[in-house]
Structure formats: C-alpha cells, structure tokens
Amino acid sequence: MSDAIPLPCKTRELHNHHMDSTIWNDFPFRDDDIIIGTYAKAGTTWTQQIVGQLIYGGDPNLPTEQLTPWLEVRVMPYEVKMDILEGQTKRRFIKTHLPLDALVFNPACKYLYVTRNFPDIVWSLHNHLLNFTEEAYHMFNDTPGLVGPPLEPPPADVKTFWYRMLREDGYPMWSFWENIRTWWQYRDLPNIKLFHYNDLKHDLEGEMRDIADFLEIDVEESRWPKIVEYCIFDWMKAHAEQVTPMGGQVFAGGAKAFINKGTNNRWKDVLTEADYQEYVDLAVKELGTECAAWVIEGKGA
C-alpha cells in the first residue's frame, strides 16, 4: 500500500460577509503561483511583503498591496482581481483566508500558511475592526451576494470581544479551529510550508531564507540585507500605503492604523490565568496536543 499523502480536495464552499470561495473553482492557475494562506491577522501582510521582496529582489517601491489580491474577497470585482493577476509577468503570489477544504488545490503550486497565537490574533483583529470606517461596514454588508449575518463592529471592551471569538469560534469572522486543522492535516506535503508569526519575530532573516528555499527563489547574497530591511515591521509601518489592503482607505486612521503594533502578548494584562487556560484547553481539544502547542508557541513548542 502506498504511503503517499493524499492531496487536498475541495469539499465545500464558504460564504460570509467577506468571502465567496466559488471564485477559486475556475481560477486559471500558473504552475509557479504562490498561495499565501492564513487566518485573519495572523501575519498575512507580513508574509505577502516577504514573498514580494524575495521575488523582486529587494525593491523599496514595491506596491505589494497592488500585486497580491485577496482572491475570494467579495467587495473587489472578479474582473479587477483577474486583471491584476493576468497582467503580471513575474511570479504571482495570491492571498487567501480560506480553510484548505474550501480552496481548490493545485499540486504544481507552492502554498505558504502562517499562523499566530489566537489571543494575539484577537487583540490585533479588535483594533482592525474598531478602525473600520462606517463606509467599510456598508461595503462588506451591502455588496450583493452576502450570505449569512452581516459584519458587526466589535464591542469596545476587548475582553468581551475575546470571549465571543473564543466561545463562538471566531465570531464575527469565521472558524479559527477549522482553518488551522485543514492546513495542519497536510503539513507534510512537499508543496505546503507551515510557519509561525513568533518565529518571524524571533529570526526574520532565518525564516525568510527558509521560505526562499521552499519557494525555490535564488537570492543574490548581496541583496539579503535590503530584502530583510524592507520586511522589518518599522519599515512596513513607515511605508504602510504600499502594503496595506486598499491602501488603508477602509480604516479611520488610514494605512498606519492597519499596520498597528505588530507586538504579541498585549492580552497578558487583561486575561487571567483561568481565561488563558480555558483557551489552551480548548485548543488541545480542537487541534490535538501537537498542533495546539505549535499554534500557541511556534517552533518553541
């Protein structure tokens, strides 16, 4: 009997205020496409910037946000996204927040999946949604084709928001647990690489070199210092309009409100030990011990 890992296959569609997964069903892949998968606020923009700078060899003027559309997002017309992608002559990199079982899988492409400890995601997402303009909420909720409940502004109190996201599995967004599980299941496939936000913070250059090797991108050694510099948080903050979705137009504070702090553990002064243990216990129940440890800590697990 073969020990080969079965390939992922699409088993369902996912629709909500942000996403329509059907756009992937007839997507014209190129075999060298790079798909960047994440849960929201887990390191998506950082990974897009890393991949872009690797492909373009270190370019301080790279308009990352304009090159790498979120394919299944409902509010950007299909034709606009396809024009962006079809016009590119260099290797393409495309963002998705879908669980792997709602995504069409192409075995010729490379897939990167980055995660982050869930409390850090929640604190970042709370800031993200608080900074959405009224026009942004109208855009997501009033665009034709909405399936399910509308997107709601978060409560002002971050702990209240935390309890809802934890106990209602990602509400008002989408399931965190299934997103992780579906990617973790296929972590041993040779064209899927999983990595962690904590590890990027701990050793950015080392992780970027690993990503370059995985993507089979040859980088001139002399270019590495600049490539890494353009992926440091402070540099991205200073050039937020180049990397922020829609140039930051949907945020009350502009692009710099999207590139907020980039720090972890802001929850430590808010959650009690019992609060955090509730999360850890649920993570183990939903993901298993090994996967839960990786989600919480990264390589340090």
Image: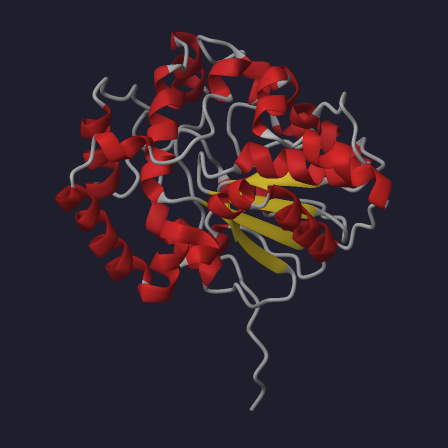
Question: Between residues 163 and 82, which one lies in front from this camera angle?
Answer: 163
Question: Between residues 87 and 233, which one lies in front from this camera angle?
Answer: 233
Q: Residue furthest bottom?
A: 1
Give the x, y percent position of residue 279: 23, 48
Which residue is found at the position 67% from the left and 61% from the top?
Answer: 107
Image quadrant where one finds the N terminus = bottom right
Which residue is found at the position 49% from the left and 43% from the top?
Answer: 197
Identify the image's colour scheme: rainbow, by chain, secondary structure or one colour: secondary structure
Question: Between residues 190 and 279, which one lies in front from this camera angle?
Answer: 279
- In the image, 266: left or right of 25? left
Q: Quadrant of residue 68?
A: top right
Give the x, y percent position of residue 89: 85, 36
Give the x, y percent position of residue 280: 24, 52
- In the image, 148: left or right of 2? left
Task: Reply above or below: 76 against 214.
Answer: above
Task: Reply above or below: 124 against 6.
Answer: above
Q: Is residue 265 visible?
A: yes
Which residue is found at the position 49% from the left and 41% from the top?
Answer: 97
